[in-house]
Image (cartoon, rainbow, N blue to C red):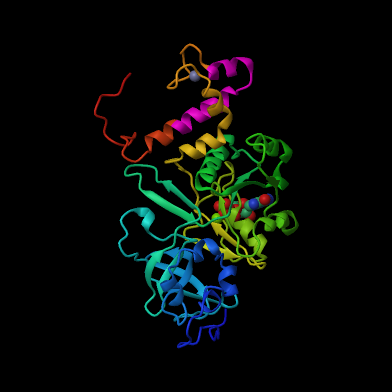
Amino acid sequence: MSATDSRLPPTGLAPTGLAQSGLADPHLADLGWRPFFAGQLSSNEAARTCPLRVMPVRVMAVHRGQLAVAGAGAGAGAEAGGAPGVAERTIPPFVPHAKTEEDHATVGDWLLIEPETGQILRILTRASLFKRRAAGSGRKLQLIAANVDTLFIVASCNQDFSVARLERYLVLAREAGVAPVIVLTKADLAADPETFAQSARALASDLPVHIVNAREPASVAALAAYCGRGETVALLGSSGVGKSTMINTLRGSSSIATQPVREGDGTGRHTTTVREMHRLENGGWLVDTPGMRELQLSDASEGLAEVFDDIVTTALACRFTNCSHESEPGCAVRAGLADGTLDAARLERWRKLTAQDAANAPGWPGRNHPRTAPPRR
Ligand SMILES: Nc1nc2c(ncn2[C@@H]2O[C@H](COP(=O)(O)OP(=O)(O)O)[C@@H](O)[C@H]2O)c(=O)[nH]1
Ligand SMILES: [Mg+2]
Ligand SMILES: [Zn+2]
């Protein structure tokens, strides 16, 4: 954007509906603004967008103690270097009356702010939200990104590839209400990338799977179709799989630091520390996420039921509704294993994820809490 932006609505202009309310600015649509968000403003709030007393902005990055936000037109503190017609600035992250972790702003959020001070008035209801519960003691909830349209689940065609991990990411995508796309990188280094693609395609019938060399523009070009004007794509995957490389290639720049993969084990170190939205030339947005070595599922029962619908549907036919599929009579799941309609390894992965989800449920004494009874042997 230019620091001398002239799109600031002239003060004193009487608002006469949405067209002049400041909410119909095409640059807001570039940022991902849509009727779902506009519909959340009261008529009073909408009127106050022109003259500018209430300003919708999107969180572009979360820094330590500060949020980088972008809105249409020039707010106070506009800086050069962003998209044309878009004003970027940093604001304090404090949300009035925030109680839980989810009440705080994360990358991709839409906020209403008071333009002069940058004070957050409120966070608009999210169309989607990615979150995880941190591993270890405390298991604090961490917000990853909000208002994401599509999730690129990124994995590499090498020894790091894991069907169990892809399933976990799929559960997360389904739970967040975001369309998943599998992107398999490092095809150029694999003897037979198609075998990796086949494993990925087997996870769901309607799942798009792309095999790419993340360093090659022609190879990633097809991915831009998921990320048109105003659309937001988040990239999720282990460290070192090529998320930052892919963003750089799609943007035709090398502005994001990538890290050489350690020799030997093929895994990467964590380079991405801030979460940040990156703009594509055609107007879409990509969100890099930090490496998630310890991605734990929590509150993901709906996502689990969608990703493992074959197992969940079969289990409905078990004689007992609380069947553990171990030794009960009339168990449809064990019958499915016996006749080959269910896969034993997949059933085992489902068991593990379901147990993890239950252990991480809020209010449930999970594995990191002191036990009231001694562990059984
Ligand atoms: N040959 C090849 N190297 C890749 C590919 N994708 C990523 N890399 C390399 O893998 C390393 C880690 O990539 P990076 O983008 O930092 O991974 P991130 O942690 O997922 O962001 C870098 O050295 C990249 O150049 C690919 O498709 N092919
Ligand atoms: Mg990275
Ligand atoms: Zn059963």
Check the image and name the residue furthest to the left: 372
Check the image and name the residue furthest to the right: 218
Front residue of this view, candidates 23 and 84: 23
How many numbered marks have been drawn onto this rendered protein structure? Answer: 0
Image side of residue 321 versus residue 95, left or right: right
x and y percent of residue 291 in the render?
50, 50
Residue at image location 51% in from the left, 39% down from the top: 303
Look at the image and say whether residue 60 sits in the magenta stretch: no
- Relative height, residue 257 to residue 344 (above, below): below
Residue at image location 24% in from the left, 29% down from the top: 372
Residue 153 seen in this snapshot: no
Front residue of this view, candidates 50 and 207: 50
- Relative height, residue 237 to residue 336 (above, below): below
Q: Quadrant of residue 297?
A: top left
Q: Quadrant of the N terminus?
A: bottom right
Residue 166 seen in this snapshot: yes
Check the image and name the residue furthest to the front: 16
Residue at image location 72% in from the left, 47% down from the top: 188
Front residue of this view, candidates 163 and 115: 115
Residue at image location 59% in from the left, 19% down from the top: 336
x and y percent of residue 242 in the render?
61, 52
- Relative height, residue 307 to residue 208 (above, below): above
x and y percent of residue 199 in the render?
66, 35
Look at the image and say whether residue 344 sits in the magenta stretch: yes
Front residue of this view, candidates 276 and 238: 276
The residue stretch that appears in magenta: 332-354
- Magenta span main SS: helix
- Relative height, residue 117 to residue 63 (above, below): below
x and y percent of residue 33 in the render?
55, 66
Q: Quadrant of the C terminus?
A: top left
